[in-house]
Amino acid sequence: MEELVGNTLAQKTNIWADSLANQASATPKANATFIFLARNSELKAVVESIQYMEDRFNKKFQYPYVFLNDEPFTDEFKEWTSQMVSSKAEYGIIPREHWQQPDWIDEERAKAGRDKMVDENIIYGGMSSYPEIMGLNILGSVSYRNMCRFNSGYFFRHPLILPYRWYWRIEPGVRFYCDLGYDPFLSMEDNNQVYGFNIALYELEETIPTLWKATKEFISKHPQYVASGNAMGFLSEDGGRTYNLCHFWSNFEIADMEFWRGEAYTAYFDWLESKGGFYYERWGDAPVHSIAASLFLRKEQLRFFDEIGYKHESFQHCPSGDRHKQGRCSCSPKDAFDWD
């Protein structure tokens, strides 16, 4: 009897899984993937993030995952994550030249910058007991700066990522609180949108003291890249003379990689790269992406995903009203950092 019940349950489970697979294959899909930058030591947090994503969205749409690491993934990591996803999972190693401080960087100057941030106790700036990101101690960490540089200018060039146009960035330990019943990739494609975000914050000025100066130099040399009807107002209160430090939090991004691979952003990143600010200071991918998207795109090409309940570290966004009800959200709007 137990064997019969077990077989029946297994059959029902297989039928349900086959039904989802058939439904997904019959649904139009974008050329898109999830991008997951993670270390083997973060396996548990990675699995938790996948479970939230699958339960709230991807079990229906079944988009693939690409996992990237600067070291080979363990068999345990690959086995556990591959059994959690509802679609294909690929695992890649980041090329060394994309994840190391360039030889032309003056290490003495770079170290002086890191030490200064440590002395001033600037979070995310320079070695202490601050939280880790991707397993990295982020104060005084060259590896953290490697990650910022990689996310700014190289992730979309990885061989496993090149076949895709769209991506949704996920990080270990994040939570998704609401059902998403539509395809955000196709929705953005249909509406000619390019960059989607969920949380906006202020950057620490001490980590990017010359980023805006470098940006103004770039747009002065290349005014043709600045879009008409752009979102300069998000970045500056005085028409671009100064930067107000606002940025889209890039641990949540849904975006079109044709923008990052395009002429304007390529030229902008190469300009920033030549300045060495990823290492002499601590330029993050969030302000770099935000500045580029706000200047080189029209405002209507940016999208705020208000309907997606999301939490990373202590920051949480939660929709309210009808969107909270429609999404069957398990978060409270009153716990959102942007609640007022």
Image (cartoon, rainbow, N blue to C red):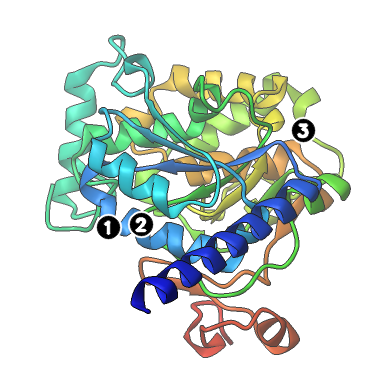
Q: Is residue 202 left or right of residue 204?
A: right
Quarter residue 84 falls in = bottom left
Q: Residue furthest front?
A: 1
Q: Is residue 89 above or below residue 330?
A: above
Of the two numbered discs 1 and 3 on the same chain, state the one appearing first in sequence. 1
Q: Label 2, secondary structure: give it.
A: helix
Residue that appears at 50% across and 46% down:
286
Q: Is residue 19 left or right of residue 154?
A: right
Q: Residue furthest top?
A: 104
Instruction: Report, in whole angstroms, how far the alpha carbon at label 1 lies from the one at label 3.
Output: 43 Å
Q: Label 1, secondary structure: give it.
A: helix
Q: For label 3, count other residues whose C-alpha is less than 10 Å away and answer few (under 14), some (14-19) or many (20+).
A: some
Quadrant where the C terminus is found in the figure:
bottom right
At label 3, which amino acid type do we have?
Answer: Val
At label 2, which amino acid type do we have?
Answer: Val
Q: For label 1, count other residues whose C-alpha is less than 10 Å away and answer few (under 14), some (14-19) or many (20+).
A: some
Q: For label 2, count other residues whose C-alpha is less than 10 Å away and answer few (under 14), some (14-19) or many (20+).
A: many
Q: Position of residue 269 (x, y in %)?
A: 55, 24
Q: Is residue 56 visible?
A: yes
Q: Label 3, secondary structure: give it.
A: loop
Of the two numbered discs 2 and 3 on the same chain, state the one appearing first in sequence. 2
- Residue 47 image label: 2
Q: Which residue is mark 1?
A: 44
Q: Is residue 188 above or below residue 323?
A: above
- Residue 70 image label: none
Q: Which residue is mark 3?
A: 226
Label pair 1/2, CB-CB below 8 angstroms:
yes
